Image (spheres, rainbow, N blue to C red):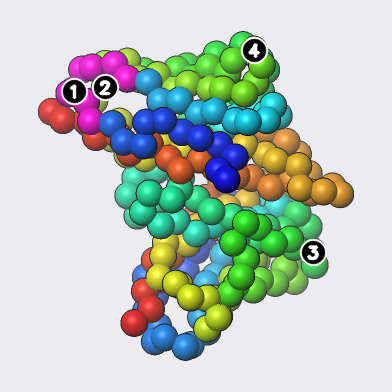
Amino acid sequence: SQELEQSPQSLIVQEGKNLTINCTSSKTLYGLYWYKQKYGEGLIFLMMLQKGGEEKSHEKITAKLDEKKQQSSLHITASQPSHAGIYLCGADRYSGGSNYKLTFGKGTLLTVNP
Amino acid sequence: DGGITQSPKYLFRKEGQNVTLSCEQNLNHDAMYWYRQDPGQGLRLIYYSQIVNDFQKGDIAEGYSVSREKKESFPLTVTSAQKNPTAFYLCASKVGGALNTEAFFGQGTRLTVV
């Protein structure tokens, strides 16, 4: 089963509209990462949230982590074509001994129509 | 400039042949990761390594092998046992043993097996 569930799977918005992407974990998170990917390229780091209730913003993108540290949302205000791409949430998962693995959700494909 | 490099960007192989994907980083990171990305599947973890000469299987390790003889390098071999090798492969690195640290990604290798 997917450890991180993202919704929606895809999203089409008109330029200028606001939108929200959600990421839910069945287990309490140590922290939560948000990345963006252009098709066929590597991932670009957006932001990381560590504390319950934390909120961070970068330009027109705001991310929040809920108090229980099991759900995060990414909100884009006044979307632009440059926001188009795949948004992925990720988290460190304990995997035994002194090991942690970095896992991701399935991603949300965002299309912004001019 | 520090970074993580994957090569080649595109790779074609005949069915039944093994192929090795390169991943090199000069960020002095201990932890390195290999992911496979298929449409609609997000990033699935193949193998990861927290330190030189040690690595762990991820969620979809069957048909793949890795080595970690040097801190800078984490090559991935796609063997003939991998049933569906055609995919986009991403390598990442981060500060080892540390939670909530940014992972840096390469630009990916698109492998096509014919």
Q: Is residue B84 above or below residue A80?
A: below
4 vs 3, front mark: 4
Q: Are marks 4 and 3 on the same chain?
A: no
The part of the image, by quadrant, that contains residue A91 is top right
User: What's the chain of the residue with tag 2?
Assistant: A
Looking at this view, is B38 or B95 the one in front?
B38
Q: Are marks 2 and 3 on the same chain?
A: no
Give how far apart the Cα atoms at labels 3 and 1 are: 48 Å
What quarter of the picture does the N terminus of chain A occupy?
Answer: top right
The part of the image, by quadrant, that contains residue B63 is bottom right
Instruction: Tell me if label 3 and label 1 are in contact, CB under 8 Å.
Output: no
Q: Is residue A52 above or below residue A70?
A: above
Instruction: Tell me if label 2 and label 1 are in contact, CB under 8 Å.
Output: yes
Give how far apart the Cα atoms at labels 1 and 4 are: 32 Å
Give the residue displayed 69% in from the left and 47% down from the top: A101
Task: Specify the amino acid type for callout 2.
Answer: Ser
The stretch in magenta equals A12-19
2 vs 4, front mark: 4
Give the residue displayed 52% in from the left and 72% down from the top: B21
